[in-house]
Structure formats: structure tokens, C-alpha cells
Amino acid sequence: MESALFEDLLQSLKEAKAIVKGEAQPSRIFKASVPDAKAIRKKTGLSQSEFAKLTRVSLKTIQNWEQHRRNPTGAAAALLIMVEKNPIYALQTLHIHDTSLGSKKLDHSPKVGRKKRPKQALKKSA
């Protein structure tokens, strides 16, 4: 390791130690906020089970988020933020046909990968 790089790392560790001891202030603080799943769901006017179907998340997961036993992360947190920022667009995008939030009409189409195919008549071989 180059001595300049080593000195930089050593200085960083000394600064971190001083911050932990309260002898110095951090140069910046990062705060990650967790989306409030219950408030976001209520904004849509959907029940927990309807919201679970819409977001393709289990009902138990929705309940855990709303009771703060677990926190949404990753793509789930991003989806909740999108629903919070623009619920009508999010609901349209997630296939709710009637976007008046009180109507609660969900698209109950078959799950991805389970396409219904028309029955074809079986031909008998002679």
C-alpha cells in the first residue's frame, strides 16, 4: 500500500474515533427515511388485502410494514415512494382501470407466466 493512501486511511480512522467520542462533529450526516406504508396505502383508499394484491406483496408483509415490525427496502420502498408521490399514476400503471381512488377496482388478471390459452379441439388420428 502506498504511504500516502495509508496516511489518508489512518487520518480517517482518527477522525472517526474523535466523532464517536464526541470530540469532533461529522462533516455530514446521512438519514435514510422509511416510507410510511400505512399512510401511503390509506392515501390510495385501498384495503390491506387490495393493496397487497396491487403491489404483489403478501398481506402479512403489508401488515408488518404498517405495524413497523419490518421496513420496506429496495424495490418495495421505491414502489411505495412512487405511490406516495403520484397515487393516480401509480395505480394506472399497476393496472387499476378506474383511477378514482375510492372505487377500488382492481385488475384480477392471471398472474404473469400463467397465460390462459384457448382450448383447442383435439383431432383424432386415423
Image (spheres, rainbow, N blue to C red):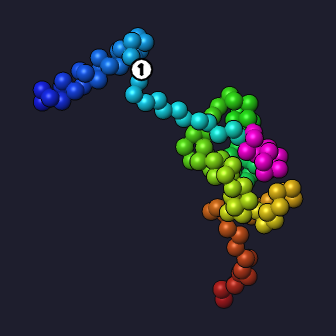
**From this viewpoint, is residue 85 visible?**
yes
Dominant SS type (magenta): helix
Query: Which residue is found at the position 41% from the left and 14% from the top?
Result: 20
User: Can residue 49 be seen?
Assistant: no
For disc 1, the neighbor class at 10 Å (few under 14, some 14 to 19, many from 20) is few
Identify which residue, 6 or 11, lies in the foreground. 11
* Image: 111 above or below 3: below
Quadrant including the N terminus: top left
Residue 77 in the figure: left or right of residue 40: left
* x 22%, y 27%: residue: 8
Quadrant for the C terminus, please: bottom right
- Which residue shows up at 69% across the image and 49% down it? 84
- For badge 1, the amino acid type reads Gln
Secondary structure type for disc 1: loop
Horizontal side of 67 relative to 16 (left or right) equals right
Residue 43 painted magenta? yes
Tell me where residue 80 appears, x and y as whole percent.
65, 47
Percent coordinates x, y for residue 85 in the rendering: 67, 52
Residue 117: x %, y % from top left: 70, 73
Residue of label 1: 25
Judge left or right: residue 71 versus residue 102: left
Residue at 73%, 76% (x, y): give it: 118
Residue 9 belongs to magenta span: no
Number of marks:
1
Q: Quadrant of residue 22?
A: top left
- Tell me: residue 61, above or below residue 123: above
**Residue at far bottom of view:** 126
Q: Which residues are magenta?
A: 38-49
